Image (tube, grey):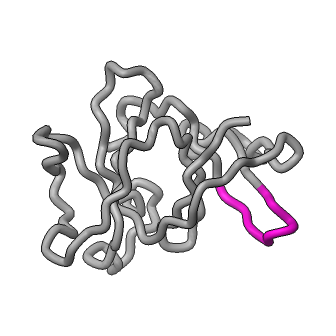
Amino acid sequence: MAQFLHIRVEDIDLLLPALQVHEVIGLEQRTRSAEDHAIWRDQVIASCDLGFILQRCSSALSHRHYGVVYSPDASSDVQPVLMLIDEVLGLRNPTRDQLHKLPGIVTTAHGLFDGIWIDNKLGLKAYCANSHWPANFLG
């Protein structure tokens, strides 16, 4: 099974495919910006608050502590994006029996997530990000 980076944005836990994560960056107070771009390794890349993308954005915008440089598409043709998040919870190796399809009717969430990971032993659950996000996910 694939390995995932377990992150948290406000009240939502997410698993990102680890092979698509380039770097996790601790953000200093002055770099916790809501600007639409960031400079990473001498490249200008898109930047977004993941809480805003997930419609969870509150007044916490200026309080995000981490950034994840992530390729929203598994192909190398797509430039990475800096996503502002609250917490990094570690690497996870979900087993097949811990992964479940998203319930209910098809919604916007189905474009970003493959399913839900539930680990009853650890008492954790998280949405599993697709390896290919829609081109318009930034808005």
Is residue 19 in view from this perspective?
yes
Residue 19 versus residue 85 in the image, above or below: above
Magenta residues (range): 118-126
Name the side, left or right, on which 53 lies relative to 96.
left
Q: Which residue is at 49% across, 65% downward?
A: 88
Name the side, left or right, on which 89 lies relative to 70.
right
Residue 45 versus residue 98 in the image, above or below: above
Residue 28 versus residue 6 in the image, above or below: below
Residue 13 versus residue 76 in the image, above or below: below
Residue 72, quarter of the rendered image = top left
Q: Is residue 125 magenta?
A: yes
Q: Nearer the viewer, residue 34 or 55?
A: 34
From the top left corner, tell me how far across and down residue 56 is, in percent: 46, 67
- Mark count: 0
From the top left corner, tell me how far across and down residue 1 is, in percent: 74, 35
Is residue 108 in view from this perspective?
no
From the top left corner, tell me how far across and down residue 137 is, in percent: 39, 40
Q: Which residue is at 31% across, 37% downward?
A: 80
